[in-house]
Structures are given as structure tokens and as C-alpha cells.
Image: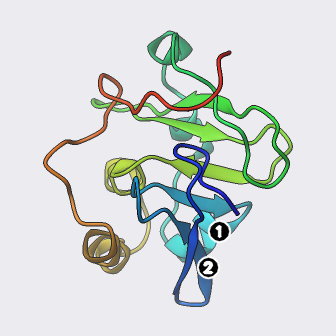
């Protein structure tokens, strides 16, 4: 499977029986449908939080292709003080998070349960770079919308 951001081959990592597809080149993460919930276990992210942000924040960003079906993915924006733009396959195949976005989303809104273990694993597997991607600073690869 190829990375939706830089088109390199994704590596498969396993955490508590959940396969996470990771791009070593750009450090993005692909989660198949349902893997976010499996990864979090008892912790939960509300669907409302995951889509609460203004779509205007993502305006101008290039759309990326789903690595499973090649359809252009939808840009979603989380709520919270520091909204995160991520990509969701319109066919329901999964979610794409650029470097640092998955950790930012999990730390922003997880409730009911200890997310510390997952957060530590994410920080260890995907260490922060000198450049953090947020709404203002997304990589500019993909397809035009």
C-alpha cells in the first residue's frame, strides 16, 4: 500500500493486535476502518469532536487519494483549541493522519480510559520532528481538489 502523502510504501506496525500502516518517509499514519477504536481500547474519541472544526480551515489543501480505493479523501477538521485537519476515505476504508496529527487528536479529546499507554507508544514510534504539522502547516502533496 502506498502513502497518500508522498507515495512511498507504507510499513505495517503492530500495537496490541492492531496493524498500523506507517510511512517512514513522511511519518504519516493510515488506520483502516475501525482501527482507531481498537487502538484506543476503552478510551473514546467522540465523532462530534472528530468533525467539529470548520471545513474552511482545510480550504485550499490538496486532496489525497485513499491508499485502498484511490478515491479522493474528504478533509475533516477536529474541534478543540488546536484543530487538526486529517483525511477520511469517503468509502469508509480508513483515516490518514500526517506526522503528529494522530497523537494531537488523541491527546485533545480522549475520554473514559487511560490513553497514556497509547500516547507513549505513539511518541516512541513516531517521535516529534522539529516541524509540527497543524492546520497552518500541512504538507502540500496530493491531488488537486
Locate residue 142 relative to residue 67 in the image: left or right.
left
Q: Residue beneath label 2, please?
A: 19
Write the residue at 65% across / 68% down. Answer: 35
Disc 2 or 1, which lies upstream in sequence? 2
Q: Quadrant of residue 81?
A: top left
For the N terminus, the image quarter is bottom right
Residue 35 is tagged as: 1
Q: At which x and y percent is residue 88?
A: 67, 41
Element under disc 2: strand
- Looking at the image, residue 122 sits to the left or right of residue 18; the answer is left
SS for dot 1: helix
Going 19% across and 42% down the picture, which residue do you hit? Answer: 131
Kindly indicate whether the residue at mark 1 contacts the one at mark 2 (C-beta within 8 angstroms): yes
Dot 2 crowding, Cα within 10 Å, few <14, some 14–19, many 20+ = some
Indicate the quadrant containing the C terminus: top left, top right, bottom left or bottom right.
top right
Q: Is residue 143 above or below residue 11?
A: above
- Dot 1: within a 10 Å radius of its alpha carbon, few (fewer than 14), some, or many (20 or more) residues? some
> Which residue is situated farthest in the front direction here?
8
Residue 136, label in figure? none
Looking at the image, residue 2 lies above or below residue 15: above
Cα separation, mark 2 vs mark 1, equals 8 Å
Residue 75 pos. (x, y %): 60, 28
- Asked which quadrant contains residue 90, the reply is top right
Image label count: 2
How far across and down, in percent of the image, does residue 73 sit? 71, 34
Task: Say left or right for 128 vs 13.
Answer: left
Residue nearer the viewer, 21 or 1: 1
Amino acid at each position: 500500500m502506498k502513502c497518500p502523502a508522498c507515495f512511498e510504501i507504507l510499513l505495517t506496525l503492530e500495537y496490541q493486535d492492531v496493524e498500523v500502516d506507517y510511512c517512514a518517509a513522511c511519518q504519516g499514519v493510515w488506520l483502516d476502518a475501525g482501527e482507531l477504536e481498537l487502538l484506543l481500547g476503552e478510551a473514546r474519541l467522540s465523532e462530534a469532536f472528530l468533525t467539529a472544526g470548520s471545513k474552511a480551515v482545510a480550504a485550499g489543501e490538496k486532496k489525497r487519494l485513499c491508499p485502498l480505493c484511490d478515491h479522493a479523501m474528504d478533509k475533516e477538521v477536529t474541534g478543540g483549541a488546536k484543530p487538526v485537519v486529517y483525511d477520511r476515505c469517503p468509502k469508509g476504508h480508513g483515516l490518514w493522519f500526517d506526522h503528529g496529527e494522530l497523537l494531537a487528536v488523541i491527546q485533545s479529546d480522549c475520554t473514559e480510559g487511560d490513553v497514556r499507554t497509547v500516547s507513549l507508544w505513539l511518541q516512541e514510534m513516531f517521535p516529534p520532528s522539529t516541524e509540527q504539522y497543524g492546520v497552518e502547516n500541512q504538507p502540500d502533496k496530493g491531488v488537486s481538489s
